[in-house]
Amino acid sequence: MENIIEVKDLWEVYSEKEVFFDVDDRDLIAALDESNETVVAVRGVSFTVKPGEVFIVMGLSGSGKSTLIRCLLRLVEISWGEVRINGQDVTAMNMKELTEFRRHEVAMVFQHYGLLPHKTVLENAAFGLKLRGVPKKERRERAYESLKAVGLEDWVDYYPASLSGGMLQRVGIARALVADTPILLMDEPFSGLDPLIRREMQDELLRIQQEYQKTIFFVTHDLDEAMRLGDRMAVMRNGEIVQIGRPAEVFARPADDYVARFVQDKRDEIRRADEQMAAMAASQAERVGIGDVS
Amino acid sequence: MFPEALKYSVAKSVNHAIKWLLNTHGSAFDHFSSGILGLLLRVQGVLVVIPWWAYLVVVALMAWIATKKILPTIILAALPLVIGIFGLWALAIETLALVITSVVIALIIGIPLGVVMGELPLFAGFIQPVLDAMQTMPSFVYLIPAMMLFGLGKVPAVIATLIYSLPPVMRLTCLGLRQVPAPAQEAARAYGATRWQLLKEVRIPLAMPSILAGVNQTTMMALAMVVIASMIGARGLGQEVLMAINRIDVGRGFEAGISIVIMGIVIDRITQGLARKWDPNNK
């Protein structure tokens, strides 16, 4: 199998009421854009992800990236287009097939953790297995193993309320690992964490990816993160993908002004760091020079 | 003045309906009535056998579990003594039996209906005005037909108490389910929870603090109603209040009133404390 995720011409319209949608009807789309009751969050997005790849979707808030990730497992109903994951047509599934698909094919990590406050860390990590009906003993063992993998083996009997943000997200990741699915979906998992912890978690994710060989679909608004983690990345604006490619390519040749602005900040940062390094090197050389004279 | 032509009275029809019910389905009501009476007498039979000091021990134990503080435990355990000192112990036990029976029936009906309301907004829309009516309808309006259908005494008292005390637990169960945070529910759905699993594993546990607040409210309403119910022949502390009113014996009314207040405080503090223990945010 060539691609593990295939998305073709995906559209997503949010609305209180059910709306009729037709991709060829430009007037209808314009009317949906005009209306205050509907939001066209994703507009004709197509892309593919290969097995074992870390695929990043980057964009500002409101660019449709969180909606896109929810379309992949139909947490929101898809308005138009096709989503194929592991050869299965997600768009065409009935409720029962969708439940099975969510249990076995994908595991999601959320920005706000989505943990259950009335369950212990261990029970939270084992939650996916419980839904599948895995016997208690086995699911506790497997949950313990993956909590160990994220370094939380001493916290299994605590409740989420007594854990820090970084630890909570480790539980979220452990829960996703226990599910033992080929695909990990991550919706800005580290954006609520402070920079040091974030970096630590990114390293951990890279290690997990190497160990478990998962396909990771990762949403972020942080270019740094995209460059550190991604094999390929897509940049989204207003529900559309404006550029898709290797992070280095996107960084070197931004497709338009929007992407360029993302990249510009990063470039400025690097330039400033370079200048500071140069200044430090110069002053050091000077001092060494002075030392020589005396 | 409201136009004469638009006047129409339903009073006669309602009277006829009640009479018709009595004549045609009288035996069904009798069966129902004896069922509830049986339950009530069984509860009362157990409560009467328990010695007075055992109640104090049970209250102390539950107060300790609920509050984990010494002073409130001692006070809560000592309060029921006052009822005994006033010589109203036996009547208080009868009232307690009535309250427990009514509350148990109210919870068995109310919590599942509240869950259905929380799951189906359309159903909630229909049932909401019914609950409003149950709470605002002056109780004598349904006490009298209840008496006609179920006879004098304890059974219509249970029915009337049910009508008055059902709404809070239903409303708060429904409210609790609606306030369950979206991220937890979304995560459960993402991991393949069916609707039933979502309800059982996420929605009901997270709504528990609100549901228990409803249980507390229902219990307090039941206790308040028991006094009024004494007017249709239910015995207990309410009967004592009624007698005191008839004889304008202020002191006797005060004793019975204070006893009811003590029961209310003890039940309220214990159920509230237990509700707090159940709250996942306190873990």
Image: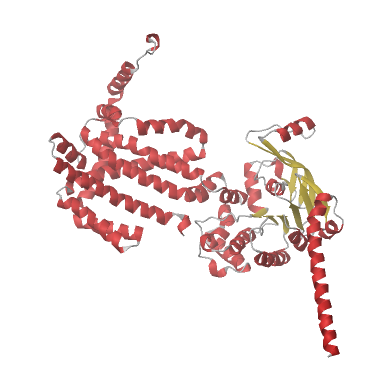
Q: Is residue B141 visible?
A: yes
Q: Give the percent coordinates (x, y) of residue A38.
A: 68, 36
Question: In the picture provided, is A97 more to the left or to the right than B248?
Answer: right
Q: Give the percent coordinates (x, y) of residue B212.
A: 40, 48
Q: Give the percent coordinates (x, y) of residue B280.
A: 47, 55
Q: Residue furthest front?
A: A294
Q: Residue furthest bottom?
A: A294
Question: In the picture provided, is B8 more to the left or to the right than B196?
Answer: left
Is the image coloured rainbow, by chain, by secondary structure, or in one colour? secondary structure
Q: How many marks?
A: 0
Q: Is residue B51 visible?
A: no
Q: Report the front residue among A189 and A284.
A: A284
- Establish if B152 lies above or below A225: above
Say which residue appears at 66% left-offset and 58% top-offset.
A191
- Establish if B78 lies above or below B239: below
Say which residue appears at 75% left-offset and 47% top-offset.
A84
Q: Quadrant of residue B81?
A: bottom left
Q: Residue furthest right?
A: A253
Q: Quadrant of residue B166?
A: top left
Quarter of the C terminus of chain A within the rendering: bottom right
Question: In the picture provided, is B253 more to the left or to the right than A137?
Answer: left
- Establish if B258 lies above or below A115: above
Q: Report the front residue among B272 and A144.
A: B272
Q: Give the percent coordinates (x, y) of residue A156.
A: 53, 66
